[in-house]
Image (cartoon, rainbow, N blue to C red):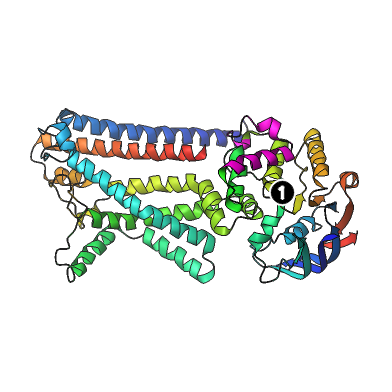
Amino acid sequence: MNPRTVIERTVVALSTLLAAAFAGLLLLILGFLLMGAWPALNGRLLFGDAPAWPALSGQVPVWDGLWPALAGSLMLVTLAIGIALPLSIAAGIHQAEYARGRRGRLAYTLVDLLAGMPSIVMGLTGFMLILLLRNILPEANTSLLLAACCVALLVLPYLVQATRVSLHQLPAELRLSAQALGLSQSQAILHVYLPAASPGILSGCILAIGRALEDVAVILLTGVVAETGLPGSLFDKFEALPFFIMVTAAEYRDEAQLARAFAAALLLMSLSALLFATARQLQKRSLS
Amino acid sequence: MSAIRCHQLSLAIGKRQLLSNISLELPGNKLSVLLGPSGSGKTSFLRVLNRLHDDTAGARVSGELTLSLSGQTIHPYHHGTDPVWLRRRVGMVFQHPNLLPGSIGHNLRLPVQLVKNPPRAELAQRIEAALREAQLWDEVCMRLDAPAASLSGGQQQRLCLARALILQPEILLLDEPTVSLDTQASSDIEALITSLKCRYTLVMVSHNPVQAKRLADKIIVFRDGSLVDS
């Protein structure tokens, strides 16, 4: 057999094997989580002994269910992405379409630096902010809003980079077409370039959602607590699934509590998958 | 009457001289064909006319260029001339159909809404008129919401022509519009161009002398960025 064919076949076989191993690993983790969570997978998982509908709306507190942590995570991610997305798209557009020369390079470098910053530093920044704010507003305290702002800062560089790269990768012909049609630069960006770049921006959004959902270090210092129920407002403390998992896994008193931590991990994965699927659907719709 | 005049017009990008001392006059409401081998400067000249080199790093245009638009003499490279305003009056169709992502209707609706912003009732009429002018209406009238990319190459190029025409330009620049098409689609586009030349000032790039002789009212030959004959 031709040596090149042997090498090609070996590479293909190895790639297939590694892809299968990766899928197998994912199934193994899911199976492990499912086994650990099995005793807790029952009707009491989300709301404990509280009735479902009043608990959903926060009329009745949930003490031994995962609903407050699930809702807290969902609120945190929605708020953080809601804050970060418009800012980062604006910054990405500026870097791709307007920033030139030394100032442009400086902006690129600063965003790249922000991307490499440890998340605990982001949390510490938020915490310091509250300490400073207390000089003016003595009531200022860590809260859902502060945590969402810090998580937004954490995911901002991913979204800026995704916007910048997606805009840079647009074909030159599309730009020429928009210009030749007599569109101003802002019209071309808003109506031609951004819609064409939206699949790439949404991919960045998916990454950012995953990052926002799993991070504990930022929220640890900015407002998350173990058992507080649903936050009544943006200025209240909140619960979150990754924090619940961390605390329960470290301090569980019996097997039932550990099973709830496993169930929370399973729920976190499901929530992540649901948000990814939603983003993919939006991506498909924008492409059609 | 000349619609386009240039005197000693030159274009350089960085250290590379693409056009040298071009002096010519192109008649209004006629078809002028720019002929020459690849790399001779035809497309570069065409893009000078609507300032499409503006965003190219290191591009420098020198010499005189005047366009006759709406009865006025316009100097495209004077400080007071807005390139966006200029491009709305000097339309362009490229070698390959450069469609906007989206449907057939979207490709026409978007530019006309952004540039002319007509009332909703007039919009549909304008779309139909542009598609009829580009001889595409009968083929697409029942599927304006279909993706533009689903059209054949010739249909896509006619859609690009309709998209340029819907903005009611006075000068239309055509950069080898038949180069990527088969014989039938090419002859459709050629017939269309012939029908348009009494209403618009057309400047077309071609490297096919037979096509140029068949269509042109005036032929200008480029070689190595300079004019050979006109």
Start-end of magenta stretch = B121-149
Q: Nearer the viewer, residue B13 or A177?
A: A177
Quadrant in the picture for the N terminus of chain A: top right
| Res A109 → quadrant | bottom left
Q: Is residue B144 magenta?
A: yes
Disc 1 crowd rating (10 Å Cα; few below 14, some 14-19, many 20+) is many
How many labels, in total? 1
When asked about the image quadrant of residue A244, the answer is top left
SS assignment for the magenta stretch, majority? helix
Q: Residue B192 at what x, y percent from top left?
A: 79, 40
The answer to whether residue A259 is visible is no
Residue at image point 79% right, 45% down: B196
SS for tag 1?
loop
Using the image as rendered, state which of residue B10 and residue B114 is in the foreground.
B114
Residue B229 lies in the magenta stretch:
no
Residue A225, percent from left and from top: 15, 50
Can the viewer see residue B71? yes
Question: Badge 1 sits on which subunit?
Answer: B
Quarter location, residue B220: bottom right
Say above or below: A110 vs A259. below
Q: Position of residue A206 (x, y in %)?
A: 39, 44
Residue occupying the far left of the picture: A253
Give me the residue at 48% from left, 46% from top. Answer: A198
Residue type pointed to by label 1: Phe
Left or right side of B213 for A58: left
* Residue found at x 58% / y 41%: B121
Q: Nearer the viewer, residue B3 or A276?
A: B3
Q: Where residue B112 sits in the image (x, y, percent)?
A: 61, 48
Location of residue B98 with respect to B225 vertically, above or below: above
Residue identified by numbered label 1: B94
